[in-house]
């Protein structure tokens, strides 16, 4: 390796190290602050706590609605993950194997929606529709929007993965008398394990971390708030000052399930992501 290449590699590694610090530091700060009291977080000149105490975690779990928030998040995310896997794999199969008029234009319109920055424009119409069917004060409104909303990324991952499955399998099953739906249920779907892990993990991360949509839908029903929304409300749970210590401890506990799920499914997640990208 020449001196010029060594310099270039050194600059690259320094840049990556700088990016890693920027990404990791906020999480590290939250973990360290979760062991301080509110006064220590706001006024202490020391970055590290004077002593390690799990009192904030105990208070967040026992004296707040943390248990209720956790159960609400588990219920919401589990339902969304199962529903997203079903709708994404089904849609991918239909666009991969199905033959119907308007297939390409419909897929093009769905693809075009990726380039529209909707932001919160959809929020009010979604809320009004949910209100019309009396789901505007519960997590079911959020669940239905997540499941039946078109996630273009999941759709293309599913379509790309199914495109890589030989069509001869379909033809052999058709000779044995299987219809379009039976081929998917009995043959294609059991082959989608890496894809299922990928779509499930993406759906879990998106729903677990979402704040705006669950906050709006549970604004009139705080007992149905998921964990991320509940953690923000912890900040104002104290009588005199904002309970930043509870919020920091709650944030750490909220991040842990996501890290555990990601580490457990990381191998399948990467396999499904690369398969869907290459085969598509």
Image: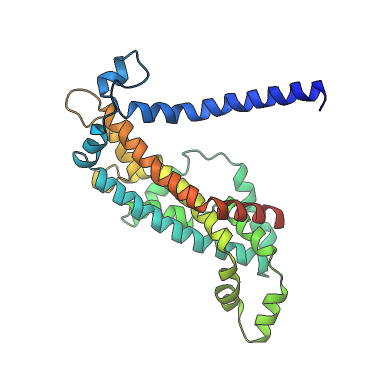
Visible residue check, residue 124: no
Q: Nearer the viewer, residue 60 or 207?
A: 60
Visible residue check, residue 238: yes
Q: Residue furthest top?
A: 45
Q: Is residue 268 above or below residue 253?
A: below
Q: Position of residue 143 (x, y in %)?
A: 40, 54
Picture quadrant where residue 33 is located: top left
Q: Position of residue 14 (x, y in %)?
A: 64, 23
Q: Quadrant of the C terminus?
A: bottom right
Q: Position of residue 214 (x, y in %)?
A: 36, 45
Q: Nearer the viewer, residue 204 or 154?
A: 204
Q: Is residue 96 above or below residue 245?
A: below
Q: Position of residue 152 (x, y in %)?
A: 58, 51
Picture quadrant where residue 46 is located: top left
Q: Quadrant of the N terminus?
A: top right
Q: Is residue 60 above or below residue 35?
A: below
Residue at x 56% of width, y 53% of height: 267
């Amino acid at each position: 390796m020449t001196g010029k290449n060594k310099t270039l590699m050194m600059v690259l590694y320094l840049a990556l190290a700088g990016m890693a610090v920027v990404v990791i530091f906020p999480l590290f700060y939250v973990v360290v602050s979760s062991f301080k009291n509110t006064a220590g977080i706001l006024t202490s000149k020391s970055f590290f706590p004077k002593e390690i105490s799990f009192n904030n975690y105990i208070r967040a779990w026992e004296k707040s609605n943390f248990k209720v928030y956790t159960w609400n998040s588990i219920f919401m995310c589990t339902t969304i993950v199962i529903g997203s896997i079903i709708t994404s794999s089904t849609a991918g199969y239909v666009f991969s194997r199905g033959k119907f008029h308007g297939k390409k234009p419909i897929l093009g319109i769905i693809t075009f929606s990726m380039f529209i920055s909707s932001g919160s424009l959809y929020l009010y119409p979604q809320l009004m529709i949910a209100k019309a069917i009396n789901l505007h004060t519960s997590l079911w409104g959020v669940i239905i929007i997540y499941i039946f909303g078109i996630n273009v990324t999941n759709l293309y991952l599913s379509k790309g993965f199914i495109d890589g499955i030989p069509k001869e399998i379909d033809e052999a099953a058709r000779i044995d008398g299987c219809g379009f739906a039976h081929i998917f249920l009995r043959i294609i779907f059991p082959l989608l394990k890496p894809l299922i892990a990928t779509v499930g993990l993406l759906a879990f991360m998106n729903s677990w971390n979402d704040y705006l949509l669950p906050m709006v839908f549970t604004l009139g029903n705080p007992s149905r708030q998921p964990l991320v929304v509940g953690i923000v409300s912890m900040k104002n749970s104290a009588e005199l000052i904002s309970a930043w210590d509870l919020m920091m401890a709650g944030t750490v506990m909220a991040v842990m399930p996501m890290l555990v799920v990601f580490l457990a499914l990381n191998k399948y997640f990467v396999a499904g992501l690369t398969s869907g990208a290459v085969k598509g």
